[in-house]
Image (spheres, helix red, strand yellow):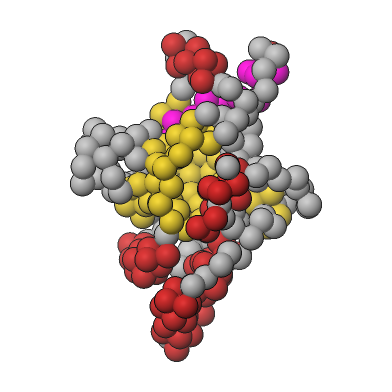
């Protein structure tokens, strides 16, 4: 990613403030390790296998939520606005994005959050196996901002297997922005002899008409875990001006050296990402 002088100076200022603060001590208490009753944990695992989705209500405390929001308020100046249709999927991307390289460079606290033992333990306890860091320099940790009427992160699959999404801001009632998931999408495409990421709008319509779309609403501080490479998902459009939806997405792989497509490069590749469409 090419960073101009103004961005570099602003980012350096953020980094200096964070380095001067005792952010490492603050990070230690960010997340309380979750210890689940064996029966509850088994249900979570079963739900994850069946639906590809598990919700973690109030995963972070209000203090932690404020700390993350403060970081993103300062980093928001680096966010890049996207308004385009993702090739293959042919679904819209209308949102502002912040890729992992900026987060890593200018927010030690958020970057360290990605490696926090309690978060990783929480994910591994549900998936029932070891997880691996996502090696993509942008996709491993991103922030997505829907702040305008009609903003949406259209239907897609992720390259990394697991997405842990933490909610910072949510729209009001009937304001849109819900997570929508078509479970077992890759299996459905196999049965229909379709590619899961190519010209899928008609199959999405069929799934919608047949009641196959699950919808989930969350609160600030909530998180969810999604098997994001197998279950098609989107963020429903915001329904009115003034609504805001802000999340941090931590991506993890289920294997080392996972293969990558180019959608993350297009969406999160700085000012030049969308140029790959040309």
Give the quarter of the figure containing the N terminus.
bottom right
Residue 14 seen from this side: no
Q: Does the magenta portion include 218? A: no
On screen, residue 246 versus residue 44, left or right, reads left
Residue at 34% in and 66% down: 73
- The image quadrant where one finds the C terminus is top right
* Residue 243 appears in the picture as rendered: yes
Vertical position of residue 73 compared to residue 25: above or below? above
- The image shows residue 43 at horizontal and vertical percentages of 56, 35
Is residue 187 part of the magenta span, yes or no? Answer: yes
Residue 44 versus residue 14: which sits nearer the camera? Answer: 14
Q: Position of residue 181 (x, y in %)?
A: 49, 29
- Tell me what residue is drawn at x 49 percent, y 31 percent: 91
Single out the residue that lies furthest toward the bottom: 20
Q: Nearer the viewer, residue 204 or 278?
A: 278
Give the magenta-colored segment's residue range: 178-190
- Name which residue lies at 48% across and 63% down: 32
Percent coordinates x, y for residue 50 in the rendering? 60, 27
Is the residue 135 above or below the residue 18 in the image?
above
Residue 184 at x, y percent in the picture:
61, 25
Give the left or right position of residue 252, taking residue 8 as reference: right
* Of 139 and 224, the residue lying toward us: 139
């Amino acid at each position: 990613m090419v960073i101009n002088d103004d961005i570099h100076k602003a980012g350096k200022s953020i980094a200096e403030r964070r380095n001067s603060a005792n952010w490492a001590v603050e990070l230690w208490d960010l997340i309380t390790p979750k210890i689940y009753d064996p029966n509850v944990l088994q249900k979570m695992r079963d739900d994850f296998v069946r639906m590809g989705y598990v919700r973690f209500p109030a995963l972070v405390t209000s203090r932690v939520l404020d700390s993350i929001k403060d970081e993103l308020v300062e980093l928001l100046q680096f966010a890049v606005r996207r308004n385009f249709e993702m090739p293959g999927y042919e679904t819209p991307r209308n949102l502002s994005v912040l890729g992992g390289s900026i987060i890593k460079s200018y927010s030690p606290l958020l970057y360290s959050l990605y490696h926090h033992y309690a978060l990783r333990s929480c994910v591994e306890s549900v998936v029932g196996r070891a997880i691996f860091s996502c090696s993509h320099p942008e996709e491993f940790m991103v922030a997505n901002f829907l702040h305008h009427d009609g903003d949406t992160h259209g239907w897609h699959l992720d390259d990394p297997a697991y997405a842990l999404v933490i909610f910072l801001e949510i729209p009001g009632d009937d304001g849109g922005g819900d997570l929508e998931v078509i479970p077992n999408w890759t299996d459905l495409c196999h049965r229909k002899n379709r590619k899961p990421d190519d010209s899928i709008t008609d199959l999405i319509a069929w799934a919608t008409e047949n009641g196959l779309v699950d919808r989930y609403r969350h609160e600030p501080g909530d998180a969810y875990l999604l098997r994001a490479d197998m279950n098609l998902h989107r963020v429903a459009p915001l329904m009115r001006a003034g609504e805001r939806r802000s999340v941090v997405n931590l991506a993890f792989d289920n294997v080392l050296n996972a293969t990558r497509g180019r959608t993350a490069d297009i969406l999160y590749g700085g000012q030049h990402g969308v140029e790959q469409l040309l």
